[in-house]
Image (cartoon, coloured by chain):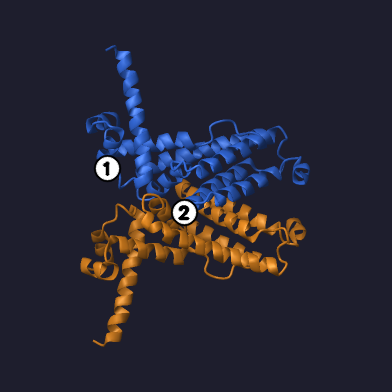
Chain colours: A orange, B blue
Amino acid sequence: MKPGQKTAKGTATRARIIETAARVMFENGVAETSVEQVCSAARVNASQVYHYFGDKRGLIAAVVDFQSQRLGPAGRLDSMVELRAWARERVEQQRGGDAMGGCAYGSLAGQLGTGHPEFREQLVDGFGGWLARVESGLEAMHRRGELVEAASPHELAIGLLAATQGGMLLAVVTQSSESLEIALDQALDRIAALTPQAGRIAAA
Amino acid sequence: MKPGQKTAKGTATRARIIETAARVMFENGVAETSVEQVCSAARVNASQVYHYFGDKRGLIAAVVDFQSQRLGPAGRLDSMVELRAWARERVEQQRGGDAMGGCAYGSLAGQLGTGHPEFREQLVDGFGGWLARVESGLEAMHRRGELVEAASPHELAIGLLAATQGGMLLAVVTQSSESLEIALDQALDRIAALTPQAGRIAAA
């Protein structure tokens, strides 16, 4: 076997372990998930998990990174059209029963945010990265005059992210996407009201 | 000892166990908390915990009820003054380092909402009770004409609760109350904008 093949295979195995661990931890809780359960679900040996991640703590850290990259806004959210499309995707994901849907990161934060200081920085980085991306899109709109002077991209970004997380939490608990949809609509309407075209949009 | 005394003492012991369990579970996580840890922190015997709660599951259920009653809106929130006072209390609680502050319920929901169907109904009841109380206050304002006809008390209540939960999650993770304050301000400003006096308030 050529070394290149082995590396590619290793990368795929590592990715499969992370994805499986993320699913099992989301379904059963982080603390309740054992390395053995992940091994059995991912069809790997415990030695492979320890090889790639050191210990369960290393595996949790990889899951936090994976969910942070997977669930945050990916593209440029620098127009009302893109912001609304992104919000619609979140609601569809929730409604479509993607059980691993957006709340997974909030769930990780809920489980690890207190009592696990070693993961706090990583969680902050995840939320911080999302906030920075949403904020930079709103800042671009602000610079181009697509948001009125008085608008604060920072505050609007926090409001949108809080609505997303709070709406998802309520949606998961009540098993209905209604609260996510309502919370996101309100956050987006607030941004839309600060566009120079607000009057026209409101009349439409 | 008279029976009355014993009952009063029992009630106090039961309350102390619940309060201690809530704190330890918040600090260390529900799954990571053992009945032994709670006993040691509350200075009781394991037999007392089993007497009052049956098992750890019963103790968790009591903690969910306790947090649901402690953290939800207590009084009548049927005016902008009371809504703003309630929001200010949430921010003060967060800022004052009441570690058991408002996010404890969201944290419980994050830990128990998935993978623990036996607690889902109870968590839904908790959020549902909060939502009903906030909504009934907004409905009273609506009936009295203190919110314009087009306002939806249901949607405004969901937006306020989502902002509270999402803002608290961000505040806990970033260890700053700023995001909670911003998210709550936005939710309350949206309600204030739907009062007939909105013009005067905006000018103030």
Q: CA distance from mark 2 to mark 1?
A: 25 Å
Q: In the image, is residue A68 above or below residue B47? A: below
**Circle 2: residue type:** Val
Q: What quarter of the picture does the C terminus of chain A occupy?
A: bottom right
Left or right position of B38 against B179: left
In the image as oriented, which residue stretches furthest toward the bottom? A2
- Measured as percent of width and height from the top left, residue A110 is found at 42, 51
Reply above or below: B34 against A79. Answer: above
Could you tell me the amino acid type at mark 1? Ser
Kindly indicate whether the residues beneath marks 2 and 1 are on one polypeptide chain: yes
In this rendering, the answer to whether B153 lies above or below A123 is: above
Tag 2 subunit: B
Instruction: Write the residue at 77% across / 60% down.
Output: A200
Question: What number is the disc on residue B76?
Answer: none
The quadrant of the image that shows the N terminus of chain A is bottom left
Rendering quarter of residue B139: top right
Point 40% across, 43% down: residue = B120
Of helix, strand and loop, which one carries label 1?
loop
Q: Which residue position is annotated with label 2?
A: B173
Residue at 40% of width from left, 50% of height from top? A114
A82 to A110, vertically: above or below: below
* Residue B29 appearing in the image: no
Count the numbered circles shown.
Answer: 2
- Compared across the picture, whether B15 is left or right of A126 comes to left
Q: Position of residue A35 (x, y in %)?
A: 25, 60
Q: Is residue A170 visible?
A: yes
Other residues around mark 2 within 10 Å, as few (<14) / some (14–19) / many (≥20)? many
Q: Position of residue B34 (x, y in %)?
A: 27, 42
The residue to which callout 1 is attached is B34
* x then y, percent, for residue B51: 26, 29
Return the disc, 2 or 1, that comes first in the chain's sequence.
1
